[in-house]
Amino acid sequence: MRTGANVGCSIFWMLSLACGGVGGSGAQVTPIQAQVAAPAVLTRPARAGAQIVSLTESTAGATIYYTVDGSGPTTASPIYVAPFLVASNVTLKVYATLAGSKASAVTTLSFAPNIAPGTLVWSDEFTNATGSNQQPDPAVWRYDTGNNGFGNHELENYCAWGSAKAPCNPASPNAYVGTDGYLHIVARQPSPGVYTSARIKTQGLFSVQYGRLEAKIWVPEGQGYWPAFWTLGNNVDSAGWPACGEQDIMERVNAALHPDWNEGSVHGTGFTGDVGLGTKFYFPAGQTAAGWHTYGMIWKPGSVAYYVDTPSSPYVTYTNPRSLTGFAGAVWPFDSGNSAFLILNLAVGGDWPRNPNAQTAFPASLLVDYVRLYAN
């Protein structure tokens, strides 16, 4: 009768552990890798047949990669970090990876909404039918907080809705949807030399790639004020700034000038700040930024254009590669496959506007009637 040694060896062989083979060669069998489960693809309707797409890992800890141009996803493809809008005919391909495991199968989903150019596909109208000020939609907007200067030596403390951390005061919110139906972003001076304000963003909640994005805005003007409506690429945490790309749709500083102005800029690796791409729009005589104006961006593959009030007449169009001529090492980041999230804020002080002075009026509000996205 055989001893139990070889029986045990057979069991361990099946478990892919080393076992003596013919002639005692000591051959090893490679363990069978577990395969990552394919990510789940979820959709919810936006407007006019557009869809907001969310991707969910089915294997804990897996990283999801995706493409929307029909190409097969790889680990060089965009990493999924936030829901994104699909408003054109595209083919989504998704897969997931996890160290030590076999990559998942590729999930493919085609979208054919056939949306006509100029169709409204998403918006936040800041509707408020209650009798009191309300929080901006928490399914769309979240907050940057604190007073770390945000890379520009700014002075404000950014406060979230409901924050009671001094100097924030929930009784005097810095961002709210008023009963007038406008988003209010309010800069306050609760004590001498102390300033509060708000910076709201859709990061992690909603993002877009391409389309005509605009907001109807009334900006405050005064020494030290720095209002802005802008975007950053979803890959900001992995690629960093400016490689993620920044699109500044509405941005200006300080008191009104004559003529008054707004600046539209784009930033990426090799073209930032004073060594970058920025163009001023000058308002017609008698107009200032302290009035209702529509600030918009037309984002298409290979180009970013900006307009004020008239979408058919952009005041500047930046294109790749032509606009990057002369910038050593410049890399156009706006066609990387990454969507971008939206930001609205009112900064106080900083490298560009400098400090408020005795003539700067507090409180002051950046008002937003709506934010809308139209199909290209």
Image (spheres, rainbow, N blue to C red):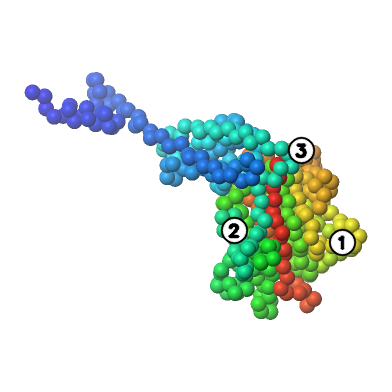
| Quadrant of the snapshot with the N terminus | top left
Mark closest to the chain's N terminus, 1 or 2: 2
Asked if disc 2 and disc 3 are in contact, CB closer than 8 Å, the reply is no
Q: Tell me the SS state at disc 2.
A: loop
Q: Horizontally, is 277 left or right of 53 in the view?
A: right
Q: Which residue is mark 3?
A: 321
Q: Position of residue 331 (x, y in %)?
A: 70, 42
Q: Residues within 10 Å of mark 3 (few under 14, many from 20)?
A: few
Q: Which residue is mark 1?
A: 287
Which amino acid does the dot numbered 3 rest on? Pro
Nearest to the observer: residue 199 or residue 213? 213
Q: Tell me the SS state at disc 3.
A: loop
Query: Mark 1 or mark 2: which is in front?
Result: 2
Which amino acid does the dot numbered 2 rest on? Asp
Label 3 – label 1 distance at C-alpha? 35 Å
Q: Position of residue 211 (x, y in %)?
A: 70, 43
Which amino acid does the dot numbered 1 rest on? Gln
Q: Is residue 13 above or below residue 152?
A: above
Q: Is residue 283 above or below residue 23?
A: below
Q: Which residue is mark 2?
A: 137
Q: Position of residue 230 (x, y in %)?
A: 70, 54
Query: Mark 3 or mark 1: which is in front?
Result: 1
Nearest to the observer: residue 296 or residue 77? 296
Q: Residues within 10 Å of mark 2 (few under 14, many from 20)?
A: few
Determine which quarter of the picture holds residue 188: bottom right
Counting the numbered discs, the total is 3
Nearest to the observer: residue 69 or residue 273? 69
Q: Residue at x 22, y 27 (%)?
A: 10
